Amino acid sequence: MFGVFKKKSKVEVLQKRYEKLMKLSHQLSTSNRAESDKKYAEAEEVLKEIDSLQKK
């Protein structure tokens, strides 16, 4: 209950964004392949940022 007020770290926020982009990319893969590839590329950039933050 007290975790409600806990501020999320930058890595947690980026992980949530990565998951959202990957889900959207998967959904678009059946209808619009080009848009799906764009979302996948965005997700990969977010993943690179997560990796760089975790290495610090």
Image (spheres, helix red, strand yellow):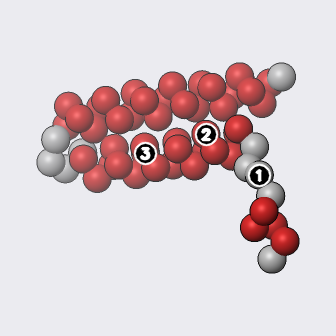
Q: Which is more foreground, mark 2 or mark 1?
A: 1
Q: Which mark is residue 7?
A: 1
Q: Is residue 48 left or right of residue 53?
A: left
Label whose residue precedes the other's in the sequence (3 or 1): 1
Task: Check the picture and name the quadrant holding the N terminus.
Answer: bottom right
Q: Which residue is mark 2?
A: 14
- State the SS at label 3: helix
Whole-percent x and y of residue 22?
Answer: 43, 45
Q: Which is more foreground, mark 3 or mark 2?
A: 2
Answer few, some or many: residues within 10 Å of disc 2's Cα (few below 14, many 20 plus, some between 14 and 19).
some
- Which amino acid type is shown beneath numbered disc 3? Met
Task: Check the picture and name the quadrant holding the C terminus.
Answer: top right
Answer few, some or many: residues within 10 Å of disc 1's Cα (few below 14, many 20 plus, some between 14 and 19).
few
Q: Is residue 12 left or right of residue 27?
A: right
- State the SS at label 1: loop
Whole-percent x and y of residue 13?
Answer: 63, 44
Label whose residue precedes the other's in the sequence (3 or 2): 2
Q: Which residue is mark 3?
A: 22
